[in-house]
Amino acid sequence: MGKIIAIVNQKGGVGKTTTAINLGAALAHSGKKVLLIDLDEQANATIGLGFSRELLEYTSFELLASDIKAEELVYKSTDRNMDIIPGSEKLVNLETALFNVENKELILQGKLKPLAGKYDFILIDCAPSLGVDVENALFAADSVIIPVECEYFAYEALPLMISKIHQVQTVRNKRGQKLTIEGVLLTKLDNRNIFGYKIIDKVKNLMPTKTFNTIISRSSHLQEAPMNGGSVLKTAFHSRASREFRALAQEILNNNK
């Protein structure tokens, strides 16, 4: 049975999509079969893997708002061992589309059951919100990764995200289901700026047992990779960014033995 990991943070610009693409590619490079689900209306993960969002007929909107089966929405990416259910700007209408749907937060959980045995990891790239799309991700996931940029406002937003996760954990525990925090991932570290290291210390004090050892640095290679329609492992395999995401993947694999 594959593991479902939601990549969440209600704050934008902290590296969720970059993490989803490159962690997925790193896990795939390790020989794991990976599915990436893009639940952001900006569809940046979709674009970052070389797809044109305007040309896709079926997307994650249909995954949540129609009767189409999840396996019919899967596209193969150019990264070996990694597939994607792409995002769409139609997701901006998701709240309206599901307004009268009962137990709408459980749709994704049900839709992913047939896929769970086909993949080692299913990564869900979430929008910067706490809406119905993120609720679906949290109720479907086995664990969550919270990317936190090494800057003050991102650190200040972390307790709100943790509070939301705890709310969902309370509900799921009553149903005999578990949701754990896989880890807080520190991102966009500028090695030349001592303030970033102060944020690292603050996050580790807040989440001492749930902060990844791997830290993702700022990198021009990470910025350039989406322009080339692939992960940094594909476009700059020997770069520091590639090494960091491969280290993160190994850390997750070690934690899930």
Image (cartoon, rainbow, N blue to C red):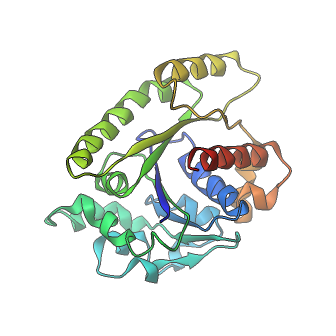
Q: Work out whether residue 256 or residue 9 is closer to the camera in this orientation and state it.
A: 256
What is the quadrant of residue 161 in the picture? top left
Q: Position of residue 156 (x, y in %)?
A: 44, 24
Q: Work out whether residue 161 or residue 170 is closer to the camera in this orientation and state it.
A: 170
Q: Position of residue 214 (x, y in %)?
A: 67, 36
- Residue in view at x 68 percent, y 48 percent: 250
Tell me if residue 191 comes above or below residue 121 in the rendering.
above
- Residue in view at x 45 percent, y 73 percent: 115
Q: Work out whether residue 5 or residue 78 is closer to the camera in this orientation and state it.
A: 5
Residue 110 in view of the camera: yes
Q: Position of residue 111 (x, y in %)?
A: 34, 72
Seen as rendered, the residue at the extreme front is 257
Q: How many tags in the picture?
A: 0
Tell me if residue 112 comes above or below residue 225 in the rendering.
below
- Residue in view at x 44 percent, y 83 percent: 72
Residue 147 in view of the camera: no
Q: Position of residue 17 (x, y in %)?
A: 56, 52
